Image: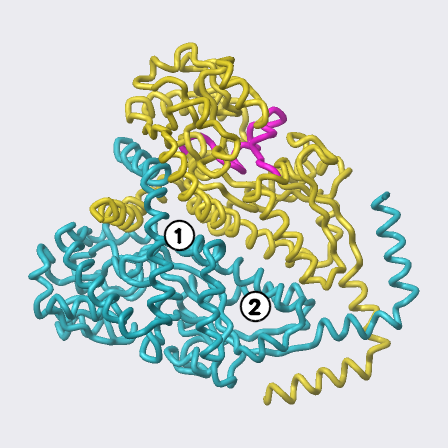
Chain colours: A cyan, B yellow
Amino acid sequence: MDRRRFVTAAGTAAAATGLIAAPAIAQSMPALQWRLTSSFPKTLATIFGSAELFVKYVSDATDGQFKIQPFGANEIVPGLKAADAVSNGSVEMCQTASYYYIGKDPTYALGTTVPFGFNARQINAWFYHGGGIDMMNEFYATQGLYGLPSGNTGVQMGGWFRKEIKSPADFQGLKIRIAGFAGRVLEKLGAVPQLLPGDAIYEALEKGTIDAAEWVGPHDDEKLGFNKVAQYYYYPAWWEGGPALYFFINSEKWASLPKSYQAIISAAAAAANIDMLAHYDALNPPALKRLVAAGTQLRPFSHEVLDACQAASNQLLAEISAANATFKKIYDAQMAFRNDQYLWWQVAEYGYDNYMIRSRTKG
Amino acid sequence: MDRRRFVTAAGTAAAATGLIAAPAIAQSMPALQWRLTSSFPKTLATIFGSAELFVKYVSDATDGQFKIQPFGANEIVPGLKAADAVSNGSVEMCQTASYYYIGKDPTYALGTTVPFGFNARQINAWFYHGGGIDMMNEFYATQGLYGLPSGNTGVQMGGWFRKEIKSPADFQGLKIRIAGFAGRVLEKLGAVPQLLPGDAIYEALEKGTIDAAEWVGPHDDEKLGFNKVAQYYYYPAWWEGGPALYFFINSEKWASLPKSYQAIISAAAAAANIDMLAHYDALNPPALKRLVAAGTQLRPFSHEVLDACQAASNQLLAEISAANATFKKIYDAQMAFRNDQYLWWQVAEYGYDNYMIRSRTKG
């Protein structure tokens, strides 16, 4: 069939039947005005910026029929209550980290990361082609949520320390700003985890109320000025190898959308997902250079330290698995997938990066 | 303002002004029927599958108004002529690897990869937040094309060899199926690169017409059965650290699209991009396990071999830069960006993967 004739014929038919076709189109493109509440402030250009990209795609794709207004943390909902507001339907959708809600159910952690979990590419492989999105949505459905992965920071930095961590014993009594499972792991090693919002960390570190603090990575950390009050910058954050962000949509609101809007949201969420990681990857290198030039001392966690943390982490995750069948089912699936990922990763990916890093250092 | 009232009011207004609103909606959602010709066969589920995902998103997002029919290589256009068919407007768009067209202009290579270039995440950082998409489109516009990155294979494997490569001297006289810049690099080391389509490689390797062949990675290579006719499987493909796939759209066709369709295509292309890499990452590990279980011998290229290849590659790329100002401009931008990427990569990303790989091996 000749394509041009087909298009012309279809166009003519549409024009001739305009009055009949109009209601069908109107029905499939309803005017909607949604709100998106983020767990992150607008100043986090990487994370909040990807929410802005998402709502722009949705608006542009629908000729402005489907408008989603993004709000920063605490503008309409407290940052750590974003998913609650979506569950109860007071806001249509949110941008958040699933693991903020482990207090409700530890299974939430598996939508972001667990210690010693996937790296960023691997969790996307699990989400998109390892059954991960569906597996998580089986759980999220019980919470009144429909979820789509919407971003990743890449491996985070291990944070800022006022003294060096030379062995696992150095965690003893260490007051460290760290959240979630990672805090509970460090507690097993004698540390005293503290929960502080981002904007309170600097002062606590400066005054010595805490000895260490983890946040995100070079770009975000530099903005908060932690390098001015702590000298040692550790890596990697073994608790955040590839933490995923999520868009949660109220289950009923999601079900009420026409199929076209669901497709637009799904594609735009995947676009936001790849975009956020690209943004972090582009911004972190220059920030790291500035930090090191200004005197920051980079320190890797030793394998002895990492081994102790992993042992404590495995213990914690086994305890949670024993108490929660849903967590166990998804966690076991993730670990099997992760082990296969690293079997493959050690060959071509790691081999390539290894050579490129050495070759760059040689100049 | 109460959101529900807003939505209701808007809905009522739309119903009341239906006759007036209809032409505007019809104009912004024209019925279009496009064709997408791929450089890859339909049997490549990873690559062709992402084109299928893309056209499904576009169709679903427009309620079937914008239909793009995907064709495999050679169905309507020869695989390596896909971009030509789009340039001259005989097909609206294609899925291809930009570096297939270096015969027309070496600048095309930079849309896929050059030897010792970016890894998959890094090229996305460059595309989405390093000015890469725009920089490439300045060039593609001169070719009658508008391009969007649409996928990545991750680091490829170095291919199948009937004898071991223990030093750069072993490339002397080696007949190897390899394309593009990589073939020209190996030529500098005395190899004899051969251009063979995928379906001719097996027989050539079996008969000894060639001594070695590179294709993609475990999943795709296993399907073609190369392990049955060559024992040594080398890694990494230093010429394909993170090769990107592209959608090319005829420039005039792109400009003629309503803004809503452009937004849908852009989001769906980014979704295809993240999806293809996730698909490869999910399929490669089990394929690698099967290959090794069936007797394949994995071999890393030694650093001595890689150093020789990189020196030859730098020489080739300098020659091309000297002869082509557009190539030089974009290549220099990529190398500056890549060097910063690996400065950062050696810290948290590499540190994390390094530990996870060692820890997995220890069990």
B337 to the left or right of A27 = left
Q: Is residue A234 visible?
A: yes
Report the side of B122 relative to A9 (left or right). left
| Residue A260 sits in quarter | bottom right
Badge 2 marks a residue whose secondary structure is: helix
Of the pair A316 and A278, the residue shown nearer to us:
A316
Residue A133: percent from left, percent from top: 48, 63
Q: Nearer the viewer, residue A139 or B328?
A: A139
In three-dimensional space, the C-alpha distance between marks 1 and 2, rounded to whole angstroms, equals 26 Å
Q: Please state which of the two labelled residues, at mark 1 or mark 2, is closer to the viewer.
A: 1
The image quarter in which residue A162 lies: bottom left
Answer with left or right where residue B37 lies relative to residue B159.
right
Circle 2 residue: A55
Q: Position of residue A101 (x, y in %)?
A: 36, 76
Instruction: Identify the disc placed on residue A122.
Output: 1
Looking at numbered disc 2 in the image, what kind of residue is underneath it?
Val
